[in-house]
Image: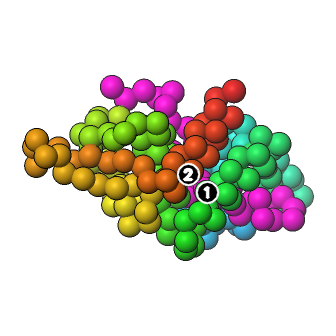
Amino acid sequence: MRDTDFFTSMSDRNTAALILALYEADRPLIMKDLQDITNHTQTLRQRIDSMEKDGIVDVEIVSSVHKQVRISLTEKGTEIALLVSMANTIIPGDISEKSINMRYADPILRLLRGKEYVVQKDIKDVVRSYDSTTKVLAKMEKEGLVTRTVSSESYREIRYSLTPMGKQVADAFETIFRKIRN
């Protein structure tokens, strides 16, 4: 059931933190400036490539004595950064520790959006990663974005619903998704 059109660069870990770092910078950043966010050069490059493909960033290779890769937000990226920033301010704490910066947070929020509840099994069917789904949902519950209830019909059926705060964040991520897809 996994629909690859449902996933974007926002579905990856650390994308929100990278967008905010670029947004808060007063100039294009180089890879070295962003290295602390992912702690791995190859992972950083993959995230930047994915964000470039989605039209969020521009990547410019500058040759001087040493090759430099400069990264900056596109106009679309700046619009997305404002939405990420808004979602970031709703949730207390550092962006690196928040659920919105975790892998699969974006599709989970969008999946829950507009529904009374979604059963955990259905979320896992879309995301297809038991560990990631469980971790993100636990973090979202701790942050007050979702509520978790056990069905009265079956103790095995765990239901997740967005809280009012979660709805605000999910709305922001739905808007981001539409901007990326258009």
Name the residue at 78% across, 65% down: 24
Dividing the image into 4 quarters, which one contains the N terminus? top left
Task: Name the one closer to the observer, 57 or 39.
Answer: 57
Query: Would residue 128 appear left or right of 76 to someone viewing this image?
Result: left
Asked if residue 94 is positioned above or below residue 41 in the image, the reply reads below
Task: Name the one closer to the observer, 37 or 154.
Answer: 154
Task: Name the one closer to the observer, 85 or 7.
Answer: 85
The residue that disc 1 covers is 87
Label of residue 138 in the image:
none
The segment highlighted magenta reads 1-29
Task: Name the one closer to the observer, 36 or 155.
Answer: 155
Q: Position of residue 158 (x, y in %)?
A: 21, 48
Q: Say whether residue 141 is magenta.
A: no
Kind of residue at disc 1? Ala
Q: Position of residue 18 (x, y in %)?
A: 65, 58
Dividing the image into 4 quarters, which one contains the C terminus? top right
Dot 2 and dot 1 residues touching (CB under 8 Å): yes
Label of residue 169 in the image:
2
Q: How crowded is mark 1: few (under 14 residues within 10 Å), some or many (20 or more)?
A: many
Marks 2 and 1 sit apart, C-alpha to C-alpha, by 5 Å
Asked if residue 125 is positioned above or below residue 106 in the image, the reply reads above
Query: Would residue 147 appear left or right of 152 to someone viewing this image?
Result: right
Circle 2 sits in a helix, a strand or a loop, which is it? Answer: helix
Circle 1 sits in a helix, a strand or a loop, which is it? Answer: helix
Name the residue at 77% across, 53% down: 71
Kind of residue at disc 2? Val
